[in-house]
Amino acid sequence: MTQVDRRAAAAEKRRARRKRMQRRLYMYAAVTLAIALLSFYAGYRVGGQSRRGRQNILLVNEANPLPADYVPDELVNLYTMRHSFRLANTGIELTRVAYEAAQEMFAAAEAENVNGFIITSGYRSYARQEEIYKESKQGYAQKPGASEHQTGLCFDVTAQNDGSGFETTSQYAWLRKNAHKYGFIQRYPGNKADVTGINYEPWHYRYVGIEAATEIYRAGITLEEYLD
């Protein structure tokens, strides 16, 4: 091989080596970009799902009233369903998702020898809430459209006691400690009336789902603050 040929061969090897290095750099860049895009997409999806989850929680108060024709989906009569709690009357209804969560919750309480819960109120129609509002003293009932009872996602509960109030019972203590595990929150805490617009109601529990209920419970906030 002549010197010219050797130089040409050496030059060809250098070109081939540069091409291999360029291909590796392109592959590295492509892989890095793909990982970055996947990470961004995953983060977007998780964040989006979280935002959608919050947006799907129905907030009802005087500032966010329900229309007069609102009727929740899948209402079930609790008297006709299997239940681990007592009922104040046979006409109480909840949405199916709230009923199923409540049944699981009260069955868990019963397994821990905490029983005697009595659900006194569930879903109310706009017309029924209007009647209650007209019959009640000012401040004792929400205006029609502004009551959570129209969602079918909440209930009022009590238990047999010595007349000193539900908040003094073992049933209340159990709910305060465990309700969030089943997707329920105490909707109107005693120290948050300035936020909710409603005075302390230890008997009123609202279904929001386990994730939201747990976050609200741990942070010690209201539904309004959670959705803000």
Image (cartoon, rainbow, N blue to C red):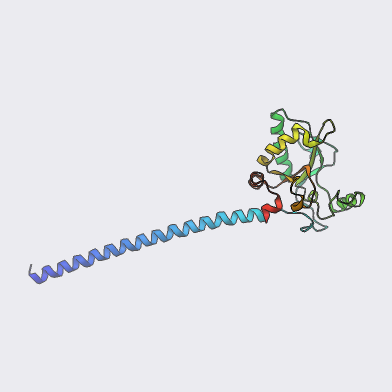
Q: Position of residue 76 (x, y in %)?
A: 78, 44
Where on the picture, by quarter, is residue 173? top right
Q: Position of residue 165 (x, y in %)?
A: 82, 36
Q: Is residue 39 above or below residue 214?
A: below
User: Which residue is painted at 60% across and 53% down in the image?
Assistant: 50
- The reply to whether residue 113 is in sight is yes
The furthest residue to the bottom: 4
Q: Position of residue 82 (x, y in %)?
A: 75, 35
Left or right: 1 as drawn, with respect to 79: left
Q: Nearer the viewer, residue 228 or 116?
A: 228
Where on the picture, by quarter, is residue 119? top right
Q: Is residue 42 above or below residue 6?
A: above
Q: Nearer the viewer, residue 69 or 62?
A: 62
Q: Position of residue 139 (x, y in %)?
A: 86, 50
User: Which residue is painted at 72% across and 37% down in the image?
Assistant: 175
The furthest residue to the left: 2
User: Which residue is painted at 40% across and 59% down in the image?
Assistant: 32
Quadrant where the image shows the C terminus: bottom right
Q: Nearer the viewer, residue 62 or 72?
A: 62
- The reply to whether residue 76 is in sight is no
Where on the picture, by quarter, is residue 22? bottom left
The furthest residue to the top: 113
